[in-house]
Image: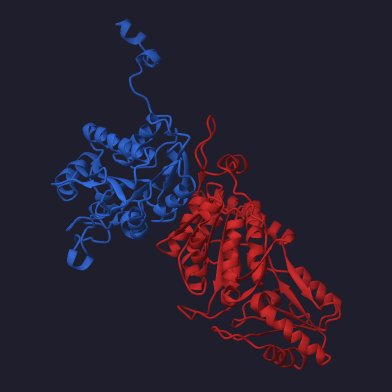
Chain colours: A red, B blue
Amino acid sequence: MGELKLMKGNEALAEAAIRAGVDGYFGYPITPQSEVIEYLMAEKPHDRTGMVVLQAESEVAAINMLYGAGATGKKAMTSSSSPGISLMQEGLSYLAGAEIPCVVANIVRGGPGLGDIQPAQSDYFQSVKGGGHGDYRLPVLAPASVQEMSDFVPLSFDLAFKYRTPVLIVSDGLIGQMMEKVELFDTMPRLTDEEVTARYPWGTNGKPKGGERRIMTSLDLDPHKLEKHNFHLQDKYRTLEEDEVKYELIDCDDADYVIVAYGSSSRIAQKSIQLARKEGIKVGLLRPITLWPFPKKQINALIKQGVKGFLSVEMSAGQMVEDILLTVGDRTKVAHFGRYGGVIHSPEEVLEALKQKIIGG
Amino acid sequence: MSDIHTLSVQDIIKPENLVYEKTKLMTDKTLSYCPGCGHGTAHRLMMEAIEELGKENDTIGVAPVGCSVLAYEFMNVDMQEAAHGRAPAVATGIKRVWPNKLVFTYQGDGDLAAIGTGETIHACNRGEQIVMVFINNGIYGMTGGQMAPTTLPEMKTSTSPYGRDVNMMGNPLKMTELIAQLPGTHYVTRQAVHTPAAARKTKRAFKKAFQNQIDGKPGVSFVEVVSNCNSGWKMTPIDSNKWMEENMFPFYELGDIKVDGKLIEK
């Protein structure tokens, strides 16, 4: 059993970064995720593991510091909240194009624009459809507890380096701010410079003696070569869709109806399921853990199993519901329910929506 | 008569006749720069400096967006291509996790002094131990000759076709003087590469800048090179160098601005 602690989600994410052997964290404060950099600065991770923490002048600078550090084969990480993540989209596109591993956590708040500082899930489209310019996708992990805020940091780095891609952790202001018990994993030592050089020969950390220099770029002025590079990226995304889908099923074995929800919404939906079952309505929960790649196969399996309708519950005006619709088509009912702009729905509201939009609709 | 024809080029190219050669830190790729442009000279001088310091395996460069976007094709060291203006942030990321490596940025005026102003000032203000090379030709070359932050007053470009009207378009920005004021810069100099004498001075400046980084001197070493853009200025290479001397140098005065962390009294 690892060390048990009562922590905020943001603190658990920060502690996990130190323990996961991250080499550099570059960030910029924004509510509701400022505890991440505050915790890191207070912890003096350089003394603990040699990890560098730097407060950048902007989110734009921070994401480009990730580009520089990540392109050398080191583990680089940042975190922010919605408006800051929008500023990072240029950098994410370049990182995806140049195939640079790194981890970016988004503690989502209400939008659009400056919005507010309350929890929301309205950055789903931006997270799973690319976000910046060009044809690319990023693996997106959605923690639903403080425990997962910790666990998903090393998991994200595994994906980032396995596929040479930025990975997003998409959480929200609720999980970032709330306190829960968390079992911390043991500290993994940072790789030495020699280990980085040996393990990641693509890293631009100084031309090998007697070897060829490396170039890290997303530019190719020859359209045929760039198309070939895009083919390669799409192949990678297909592999991710095949091999890396993660989800959780709760009470789905006998379910007539399934709520699809991630992050905070999935926690609320668990209560809605209990309320429904008390009334004799058999409802289950499909919780996508990877928002991209999306658990399409699991939705198909649930339809085969006889599920008569899916309710997408999101703290947004209805974004993930489009991916459910793309999978389901007209085979069965699909609807969306959610409060947004920083308002959190109640379990009762969710159940009422299920009755009206799916069961009775 | 026959003696003249027996001496071929191959007879001259012999190791014992070699007095100067291209640094092996420049690749054999044909430069993409316009004939007459100063970029190629600046590239070569910088690479010679790195080679002479024996640091080819310990250097990571960051290329900009602009005419020198393809600098990584020509500089034979590990290179990263940054987004427009972000090279100082990228270099910060590299240097912070590889503090013993030499890290440099190579940027034009649009990159360093317009879109990347924030990154430039803050990297300089944090005192990152990097070398920043700033090629200032007063114009946006790659996109076809538009106005730069460093375009001189009354100077004609495709977006100031009647000359830069400072009341409407603002004044040229002396970024180098600006960052020299920051305690995070250690060495700040402005040079040129249009004559052999100027090129020799610039090479000394590059060497000093990289030596500062090797020695762990605190802060940025910043080398501006005032250069020509004969295509953008719509002049012959010779005329452009003359124009540069007559118009650019009085405004962008050559010489050291800050040495060993101390501003030079003028």
> Which residue is found at the position 17% from the left and 67% from the top?
B167
Camera-side residue of B199 and A279: A279
Q: Position of residue A265 (x, y in %)?
A: 66, 80
> Which residue is found at the position 47% from the left and 55% from the top?
A65
Name the side, left or right, on which B141 lies relative to A37: left
Q: Position of residue A57 (x, y in %)?
A: 40, 62
Please count the marks in the image. Answer: 0
Q: Position of residue A223 (x, y in %)?
A: 53, 51
Camera-side residue of A346 and B60: A346
> Which residue is found at the position 36% from the left and 8% from the top?
B6
Residue A129 visible in the shown view: no
Name the side, left or right, on which A193 lies relative to A356: left
Q: Is residue B83 above or below residue B53?
A: below
Camera-side residue of A259 and A346: A346
Q: Is residue A112 above or below residue B12?
A: below
Q: Is residue A39 above or below residue A116?
A: above
Q: Position of residue A245 (x, y in %)?
A: 72, 64
User: In which quadrant of the rendered image does the N terminus of chain B lie?
Assistant: top left
